[in-house]
Amino acid sequence: MKKFLIKHSNLLAALALVVTTLTVNSTCTWMTYQEKLPETAMKLRKF
């Protein structure tokens, strides 16, 4: 498992950044609760 994480750490970091960017730029649906985002994630907003 450790070798897998070391080998694919760049891919996992890029995937985390993409998911965070998508989450910041979207709103929640009416049935779910949207938690407050950290200030560092708010810097990724496009609007």
Image (cartoon, rainbow, N blue to C red):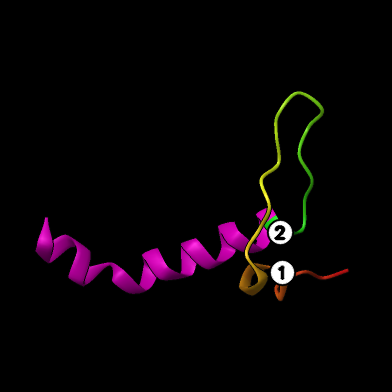
Name the foreground residue: 42 vs 19.
42
Asked if residue 8 lies in the magenta stretch, the reply is yes
- Quick one: label 1 or label 2, which is nearer the N terminus? 2
Q: Is residue 13 above or below residue 24?
A: below
Secondary-structure class at tag 1: helix
Measure the C-alpha gap from mark 1 to mark 2: 7 Å
Q: Position of residue 47 (x, y in %)?
A: 88, 68
User: As drawn, which residue projects farthest toward the right?
Assistant: 47
Residues drawn in magenta: 1-23
Q: Position of residue 13 (x, y in %)?
A: 41, 69
Q: Which mark is residue 24?
A: 2
Q: Which mark is residue 42?
A: 1
Residue type at mark 1 is Met
Asked if residue 12 lies in the magenta stretch, the reply is yes
Predominant SS of the magenta segment: helix
User: As drawn, which residue projects farthest toward the top?
Assistant: 31
Q: Position of residue 6 (x, y in %)?
A: 19, 71
